[in-house]
Amino acid sequence: MEGKLSLFVDGDSVPTAIRAVILRRILKQQIPTIFAADRKLKDVQVASEEETARLRREAKAEGMADPKELKKLKGCLSYVVVPTGDGSADDWLVGHMTLPALAVTHDIPLAARLIEKGAVVLDDRGNIYDEHNIAPRLSERDINTQLREWGVQSEHTQRMDQRQLKAFSDAFDMTLQKLQR
């Protein structure tokens, strides 16, 4: 892989606790990251504003005081709010992804689209998807969707607990290290 690794986060599908793990890590390591969502994500917005303020303080301390130059400062965190609509954030992520890339999403169809474009995908439970294992997961998702539509099965999403949060954090760290080599 050539170029610097970028991280793409489906902000609509990733829980707040997972976003907090991602934000801490990317701000510490300065990993270029884009969060995309069709709504405002207060935690990401606050982190972005704090990063911008920090960059401006550092620039002023180094003697860069020109307001036009300060406005050009870009940190590692970008935040895009797309128009509301079914799949609008997904489409934005697929259309703007650059390689090498790691994407984080709970959305299996989006994961399949991103993998098709060359990304490695991590879900919010710490599962890593690639071209070798996404097809069975997509089939399983489609079957479960059909069963819910027929009324045979109800949807039951487990609340995230500390064990799952740790599993994500460990998988996130391991995957980042592997992809940054």
Image (spheres, rainbow, N blue to C red):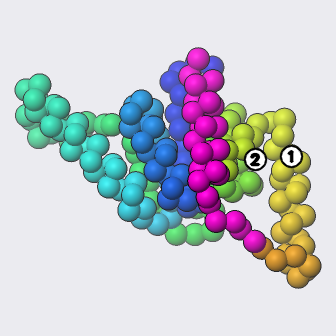
Query: How many callouts does the rendering have?
Result: 2
What quarter of the picture does the C terminus occupy?
top right
Asked if disc 2 and disc 1 are in contact, CB closer than 8 Å, the reply is yes
Q: Is residue 84 left or right of residue 151?
A: left
The amino acid sitting under disc 2 is: Ala
Give the main secondary structure, helix, strand or loop, of the magenta stretch: helix
Q: Residue at x 75, y 47 (%)?
A: 112
The earlier-in-sequence mark between 2 and 1 is: 2
Residue range (magenta): 156-181
Q: Is residue 161 magenta?
A: yes
Q: Which mark is residue 119?
A: none
Query: Depth check: 129 or 37 in front?
Result: 129
Up-down: is 41 above or below 111?
A: below
Q: Is residue 180 left or right of residue 142?
A: left
Task: Characterize the local packing of mark 1: few (<14), some (14-19) or many (20 or more) Cα atoms within 10 angstroms.
Answer: some
Q: Which residue is mark 2?
A: 112
Quadrant for residue 90, please give it.
bottom right
* Residue 64 place in picture, x, y as percent: 11, 29
Query: Depth check: 107 or 92 in front?
Result: 107
Q: Residue at x 49, y 52 (%)?
A: 19
The amino acid sitting under disc 1 is: Ala
Q: Which mark is residue 135?
A: 1
Up-down: is 28 above or below 150?
A: above
Q: CA distance from mark 2 to mark 1?
A: 8 Å
